[in-house]
Image (cartoon, coloured by chain):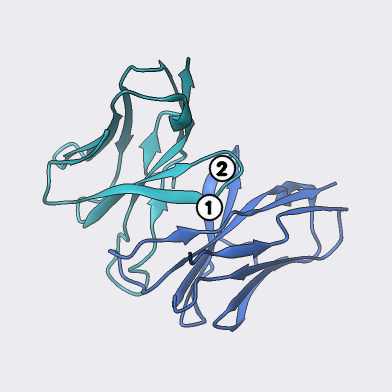
Chain colours: A cyan, B blue
Amino acid sequence: GEDVEQSLFLSVREGDSSVINCTYTDSSSTYLYWYKQEPGAGLQLLTYIFSNMDMKQDQRLTVLLNKKDKHLSLRIADTQTGDSAIYFCAEGARDRGSTLGRLYFGRGTQLTVWP
Amino acid sequence: DARVTQTPRHKVTEMGQEVTMRCQPILGHNTVFWYRQTMMQGLELLAYFRNRAPLDDSGMPKDRFSAEMPDATLATLKIQPSEPRDSAVYFCASKIRDFETDTQYFGPGTRLTVL
């Protein structure tokens, strides 16, 4: 996971937008993912983007992908206190051999939403 | 509502004791992962099985850790002897096929404390 980088902390006020950034390493990754981890729980897939897309929108979530800079971002509109969690960026397998299905995770960004 | 289950949810043990963590992947999933999460290291992949065969356990300390899948419905992770530095949350995840496009579903984790 050390090659997928994210900032560790982000604090926002309720109702504002949150933007969580990530840089990844492998330009050949087909999919890039965002996972969410709520306190005391496992990771849950939030959304993903196919590498030939620049943007994907899903309700309050917008994923932006800049392949040239290997930069991925997750924007949460109208952030709520319930969005407080750790958000992980992940990229797929770097070699296309036997470990096709594994993911490489960043360290996670702790999002804190203040009322 | 199919889920990955893990037992125990919490384990406190003394240094030198054997610890066994169990995971039941979602029925029909052929790929299973074990991860360890700590504040210092983030999320680390320990082991990775496809159709019960180990694909990659390079992230696992071999001298004390072992991972097996006795059958398709059970994955185990053992630590013997346990050490305080093994204190972490251990997650199991499964996916239906070992393809990049398939989602990893995480269990709730086992929080291990070694005194």
Observer-nearest of A107 and B12: B12
Mark 2 neighbour class, 10 Å CA radius: few under 14, some 14 to 19, many 20 or more: few
Image location of residue A5, percent across then percent down: 38, 37
Please say if B25 is above or below A49: below
In the image as oriented, which residue stretches furthest toward the front? B1
The residue sitting at 27% across, 64% down in the picture is B101
The residue sitting at 52% across, 40% down in the picture is A38
Left or right of A63, for residue B2:
right
Q: Are marks 2 and 1 on the same chain?
A: yes
Left or right of B22, for residue A72:
left
Under mark 2, the amino acid is Gln
Left or right of B13, for residue B48:
left
Please say if B90 is above or below B95: above
Please say if B75 is above or below A8: below
Q: Is residue A71 visible?
A: yes
What's the mark number on residue B69?
none
**Residue at the spot of label 1:** B44
The residue sitting at 37% across, 69% down in the picture is A99
**Residue at the spot of label 2:** B41
Q: Is residue B63 visible?
A: no
Image location of residue A84, percent across then percent down: 48, 29
Mark 1 neighbour class, 10 Å CA radius: few under 14, some 14 to 19, many 20 or more: many
What chain is tagged by disc 1?
Answer: B
Under mark 1, the amino acid is Glu
Q: Are marks 2 and 1 in contact (CB under 8 Å)?
A: yes
What chain is tagged by disc 2?
Answer: B
Image location of residue B24, percent across then percent down: 59, 71
